[in-house]
Image: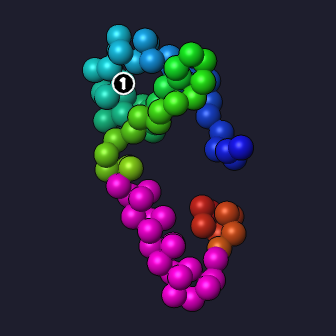
Amino acid sequence: MSSVQYSREEIISVSEAGRNLKQLISDLETGEKDRVVITKNGKLKVVFQLIEDYEESQSFLLNELDHYKKTGESYSYEETFS
């Protein structure tokens, strides 16, 4: 089970996402939203975010993994995300 929490404002259905795709992209670009979580049949399925944010998070995770492989040291959640 995931420890990631999503607010109700972030979650929309796939049909709503389809109807409002241009607005969702605009909301992400302006910073009104950081991410949009899309549901299908009532289940969380997709996180929609700007490519820059996705690439930044992937780079961060890969750097953390590389550090762990080289040193064996890991950081707590609080150390990593504070």
On screen, 54 above or below 50? below
Q: Which residue is mark 1?
A: 24
Residue nearest the viewer, comparing 71 with 75:
71
Please name the residue shown 52% across and 30% down the image.
45
The answer to if 56 sits in the magenta stretch is yes
Residue 40 in sight in this render? yes
Out of 2 and 25, give the one closest to the viewer: 2
Residue 5 horizontal/vertical position (percent) = 65, 39
Q: Which residues are magenta?
A: 55-74
- Identify which residue, 1 or 4, lies in the foreground: 1
Q: Tell me what residue is drawn at x 60 percent, y 24 percent.
A: 43
Q: Is residue 37 visible?
A: no
Residue 29 rendering spot, x and y as whole percentages: 31, 35
Is-magenta flag for residue 58?
Answer: yes
Amino acid type, mark 1: Leu
Quadrant (top left/top right/bottom left/bottom right) for the N terminus: top right
Q: Quadrant of the C terminus?
A: bottom right
Q: What percent of the width, then of the height, locates residue 41?
A: 56, 16
Q: Is residue 25 left or right of residue 44?
A: left
Residue 74's x, y, as percent?
A: 64, 77
Q: Residues within 10 Å of mark 1 (few under 14, many from 20)?
A: some
Relative height, residue 68 to residue 17 (above, below): below
Farthest front residue in view: 41
The residue at 32%/20% (across/down) is 21
In the image, is residue 30 above or below residue 9? below
Residue 29 placement, left or right of 32: left
